[in-house]
Amino acid sequence: MDPAERRNRLNLYRRSLAEVNSQTRLAAMEITRAANQWVCDLVAYEPGKPIEETARELGLEPGDIIKLASNENPLGPSPKAKEAMAAEIERAHLYPDGGGYALRSALAEKYEVKFENVVLGNGSNEIIELLCHSFMKPGAALIAAEHAFVVYKLMATLFGADYIEVPDPGFVHDLDAMAKAITPETRLVFIANPNNPTGTLVGQKEIDRFVEALPEHVVAVFDEAYYEFLPDPPDTLKHVRAGKNVVVMRTFSKAQGLSALRIGYGITTAAITGLLNRARQPFNANAMAQAAALASIQDEEHIAETVANNAEGIRFFQQAFEDRGWEYVPSFANFVLVNVKDGDRVFGGLLKKGIIVRAMRGYKLPEWVRISVGTPEQNQRCLEELDGLLAD
Ligand SMILES: Cc1ncc(COP(=O)(O)O)c(C=O)c1O
C-alpha cells in the first residue's frame, strides 16, 4: 500500500472511531434518561473509608491505620472460623450449598425455630433487599425512624416506593408513632434494635404492644445486627414462633467479625421465607461464608471475649465523654455517637492522624461523629487525638 493510501485509510479509521465514541457518549447520556427515575435520583451508600485507601493517601502502612468506622470486631474472626475457611479453600471449585442446609439447621436449633423459618443473606443487607423485592413497588410504603440505618431508605427508593420517616425523640424509635404512621399502602416497618447510628434500644413492652396491633398487610422487621452485644435482649423471636408477620434479621458481620464474607440471616414465618427464597439468587450465601459462620456460632468463647472488650470500650468512651462534658448517646451497640460540634472537621482531623471514624452529615447530624469500639489501645489513641482536636 502506498503511503498516501495508508494515510487515507488511517484518517478514515480515526474518523469512524471518533464517531463511535461520540455515539457511545450520547448513548450513555440517553440511557440514564431511559432508566428508572428513582434509581437516577438515588445517592449511593457511602461506606466507611477503607484502610488501604487512607494509608495510600497518608503515605502510611495499612498497619498504622486504626479503623473505627464500620462497627467491625476489633478482635477479628474466631480462630475456629479461620480454620473452617482454610478447609473450605479446597472446595472453592464447587458451587456452595444454595439451600444453606448446615448453617440454617444450626441457626434453627440455636434459636428454637424450624429450618424453614431461616433464610440466609449476602450480609443482612441482602435480607433488606429481598424484603423490598417481595413487598416494595411504586405506591407501596416503608416506615422507619428518622435516624434509622440508612439502607432502608436506599432500598425503598430503589424500588420506587415511598419512604416514611417517623420522628425519634431523643434518638429512640417511637413505636407508637410508627404504628400510627401505618396506612393501607404500608407493607414494611423497620425497627433497628439497637439502631445504627444512634445505638439506642426499644424495650420488650413497646415491641409487644407494636406487634399486637400490627395490621395483617404489614410486616414488622426487627433488625438486630448488634443483638449479641445486649446483656438482656428483648425477645422478638417469640412473635415469629407465634406466626406473626415479623422478621428478625441478624448478621455475622459484627460480633462474629465476618464482615468481609457477607453473611447474615432472617428468621421469620415459612410464608415469608418462601417469598424471600423466591426473590434471592440461588447461591447468594457463599461457601466460605457459610463454613465460617457455622464455626463461629459454635465459638462461644470468642463471642464472650468480643462482648467483654466491647463493654469495656463503651464504658471507656462514655466515661471520657461524660468527664469532658461532651454530649453523647448512651449506646447498646459497639459504637458511640458523640457531638463534636463539627463532625466533618473532626473526621478530617482524625483521618490525618490515621484514625478513621464516621462523619454523620449523611444522617442529617453534621455535628456528630460515630466511633466504633476498638481494642483498648485503639480507643485510647482515638481519645487522645480527639482531645487534641477539641481542646479550646
Ligand atoms: C442496623 C444494621 N443493619 C444491618 C447492617 C448490615 O450488615 P451486614 O449486611 O454486614 O450483615 C448493618 C451494618 O452496619 C447495621 O448497622
Image: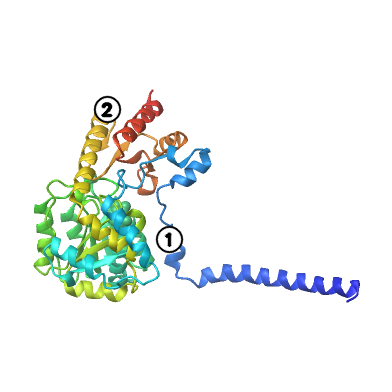
Disc 1 target residue:
42
Q: How far separated are the C-alphas under marks 1 and 2? A: 38 Å
* Callout 1: CB less than 8 Å from ligand 1: no
Q: Residue at x 45, y 68 (%)?
A: 37
For residue 325, which numbered disc appears in the image? 2
Does 319 sit above or below residue 363?
above
Q: How many marks?
A: 2
> Is residue 134 visible to the viewer in this orientation of the structure?
yes
Does 29 sit above or below residue 384?
below
Q: Residue at x 91, y 75 (%)?
A: 2
Looking at the rendered structure, the secondary structure element under dot 2 is loop
Quarter holding residue 51: top left
Q: Position of residue 79 (x, y in %)?
A: 28, 50
Mark sitting earlier along the chain (1/2): 1
Looking at the rendered structure, the secondary structure element under dot 1 is loop
Q: Residue at x 36, y 72 (%)?
A: 95
Q: Nearer the viewer, residue 248 or 337?
A: 248
Q: Position of residue 331 (x, y in %)?
A: 22, 42
Counting other residues with Cα less than 10 Å from the Cα at mark 1, is it few (<14), some (14-19), or many (20 or more)? few
> Is residue 224 visible to the viewer in this orientation of the structure?
no
Query: Mark 2 is on which residue type?
Result: Gly
Left-right relation of 78 to 271: right
Q: Position of residue 123 (x, y in %)?
A: 31, 60
Quarter holding residue 324: top left
Image quarter hosting the N terminus: bottom right
Query: Mark 1 is on which residue type?
Result: Leu
